[in-house]
């Protein structure tokens, strides 16, 4: 019985990966087919991007402040508090900014996509769209993927900037450091590979958030309880994939650039 359960779970996992790949591939293929549904794209960009601004700004600011506090307390032991800005900027841009922003967007938008699309599935609105000749992947999934990838890119940049600013305010007001020195070291320490790493990650993270949310939403079964399960699965799976993908991207880029 145990082997049968393992075999069944493995088959379900492989089938889910196959269906996810098919949905993602078909959605990306729709990028080059008319109609483009520009109004839906702008609407999703507003919901995902502008709607996520408050949580991204607050999270980035306090993360930068915490990084400054923790870094300064450690660097004080070595008389190197002047490098606080360098540690904050490197940490925010390369790692913490992209990952935490993606997790916040995932919790807010992957769950929203899964619940919205799942509700449309259980109320047979998706079937009605197909009956009218409208491709649900083109109308519903593709705009969400494009909007999430584009908005995630700018949200991460904003989070990085606010985080460095928050670290600067904490360093100056609470730790008594020189502000010009903090921002000077923050800027001078950055190199092209660091910025590239911080800008590549949100593209992959945005794709993961949108495709996972849409996948579980489109695969919803079982009425309102199924919608709840899909919402939970979308957030959990997208969060795990974001962290795993972050490791793979970091390892790949560090192997290329050496930092």
Image (cartoon, rainbow, N blue to C red):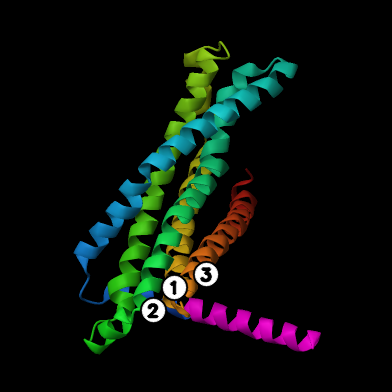
The residue where tag 3 is placed is 229
Q: Are marks 3 and 2 in contact (CB under 8 Å)?
A: no
Residue 133 sits in which quadrant?
Answer: bottom left
Query: What's drawn in magenta, residue-wise?
Result: 1-21
Quadrant for the N terminus, please: bottom right
Front residue (pair 148, 203) = 148
The answer to whether residue 197 of the structure is visible from this angle is no
Q: Earlier in the sequence, mark 1 or mark 2?
A: 2
Whether residue 251 is situated above or below residue 23 in the rendered picture: above
Q: Earlier in the sequence, mark 1 or mark 3?
A: 1
Left or right for 176, reference 27: right
| Spot occupied by residue 23 in the image (x, y as percentages of width and height) | 43, 78
Q: Indicate whether residue 14 is drawn in magenta.
A: yes
Q: Indicate whether residue 140 is drawn in magenta.
A: no
Quadrant for the C terminus, please: top right
Q: Which mark is residue 37?
A: none
Left or right for 249, reference 156: right
**Secondary structure under the numbered disc 3 in the rendered image:** helix
Front residue (pair 224, 238) = 224
Q: Are marks 1 and 2 in contact (CB under 8 Å)?
A: yes
**Secondary structure under the numbered disc 2 in the rendered image:** helix
Whether residue 221 is situated above or below residue 57 in the rendered picture: below
The residue where tag 1 is placed is 224
Q: Residue at x 45, y 26 (%)?
A: 165
Other residues around mark 3 within 10 Å, as few (<14) / some (14–19) / many (≥20):
some
Q: Earlier in the sequence, mark 3 or mark 2?
A: 2
Between the residue at mark 1 and the residue at mark 3, the CA separation in whole angstroms equals: 9 Å
Q: Residue at x 49, y 77 (%)?
A: 21
| Spot occupied by residue 50 in the image (x, y as percentages of width and height) | 31, 47
Between the residue at mark 3 and the residue at mark 2, the CA separation in whole angstroms equals: 13 Å
The residue where tag 2 is placed is 122
């Amino acid at each position: 019985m145990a082997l049968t359960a393992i075999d069944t779970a493995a088959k379900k996992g492989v089938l889910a990966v196959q269906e996810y790949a098919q949905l993602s591939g078909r959605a990306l293929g729709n990028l080059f087919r008319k109609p483009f549904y520009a109004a839906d794209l702008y609407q999703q960009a507003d919901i995902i991007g502008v709607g996520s601004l408050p949580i991204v700004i607050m999270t980035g600011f306090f993360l930068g402040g915490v990084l400054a506090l923790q870094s300064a307390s450690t660097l004080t032991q070595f008389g190197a508090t002047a490098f606080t800005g360098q540690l904050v900027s490197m940490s925010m841009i390369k790692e913490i900014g992209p990952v935490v922003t993606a997790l916040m967007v995932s919790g807010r938008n992957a769950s929203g996509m899964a619940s919205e699309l799942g509700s449309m599935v259980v109320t047979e609105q998706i079937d009605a769209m197909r009956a009218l000749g409208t491709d649900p992947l083109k109308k519903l999934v593709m705009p969400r993927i494009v909007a999430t990838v584009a908005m995630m890119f700018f949200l991460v940049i904003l989070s990085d900037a606010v985080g460095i600013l928050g670290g600067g305010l904490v360093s100056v007001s609470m730790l008594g450091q020189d502000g010009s020195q903090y921002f000077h070291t923050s800027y001078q320490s950055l190199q092209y590979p660091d910025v590239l790493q911080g800008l590549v990650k949100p593209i992959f993270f945005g794709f993961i958030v949108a495709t996972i949310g849409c996948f579980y939403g489109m695969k919803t079964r079982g009425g309102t309880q199924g919608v709840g399960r899909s919402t939970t699965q979308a957030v959990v799976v997208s969060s795990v994939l974001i962290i795993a993908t972050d490791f793979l991207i970091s390892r790949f880029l560090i192997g290329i650039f050496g930092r």
